[in-house]
Amino acid sequence: MPSQIRPNRPEVNDRFPMLGFTIRTDGEKKRYEVAVAADVSLFRQEAKSKRSRSNFYSSRACGLQPISSGEAVYVLPAEVLARFVGQGKLYYALVTYANGPSNAEISTLPAEGSPYVNLSGLTGRSLKRVRVLPTRQDASNSYGRARMRPRVWHTVSSKPVLLMPMIGPLQTATRLSS
């Protein structure tokens, strides 16, 4: 069975501003990464220059996630979801790894007409109430780009695409130095 990813909700809005994905594999121990984008074209290698914090994210920025029993749930961090406020659609992709990062299997890569999560009802009001959206002071207290290491998002081509990880409030300096 090829690995599969499905959103736990077809729509994210201010009333329920959370998004999770159920990931199923063939039962073998694997690791995975989930990528989300506001446009399907952003998953292609030639579109890497068009990616930004507000239109693309890969969970690999926080490391590969384990799947031990053939099924896992990945919850998109709220601070990442907040970056997509104002986008109408959120497309998703899955890459699984059987024996380390060199054995990547692109399980799901969206194309025009692929399913997506509807974000049109997400204005960010509910995220502001729980202080997920950064204030001006929080934004100025970042570590900056000098401490960031490049990450890779695997695309259909054999050449990986370099990404820069997004530093969120839940990541620590020890995570970045590993």
Image (spheres, rainbow, N blue to C red):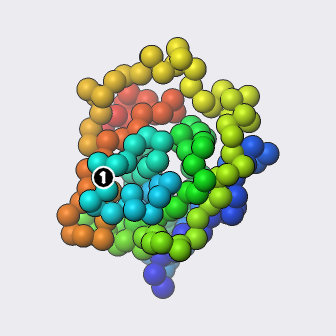
Residue occupying the point 26% across, 26% down = 146
Q: In the rendering, at what x and y percent does residue 94 appear?
A: 45, 66
In this picture, residue 103 sits left or right of residue 118? left
In this picture, residue 27 sits left or right of residue 99? right
What residue is disc 1 on? 48
Q: Note whether 52 is above or below 105 in the view shown.
A: above
Residue occupying the point 30% across, 52% down = 48
In this orientation, does residue 144 appear? yes
Residue occupying the point 43% across, 40% down = 53
In this picture, residue 138 sits left or right of residue 146? right
Q: In the rendering, at what x and y percent does residue 132 appear?
A: 62, 31
Q: Residue furthest bottom?
A: 1
Residue occupying the point 30% across, 71% down = 156
Q: Note whether 45 is above or below 16 in the view shown.
A: below
Q: Residue furthest left?
A: 159
Q: Note whether 51 is above or below 22 in the view shown.
A: above
In this picture, residue 129 sits left or right of residue 153? right
The three-letter amino acid code for the residue at tag 1 is: Lys
Say what secondary structure mark 1 lies in. helix
Q: Note whether 63 is above or below 43 in the view shown.
A: above
In this orientation, does residue 151 appear? no
Quadrant for the C terminus in the image? top left
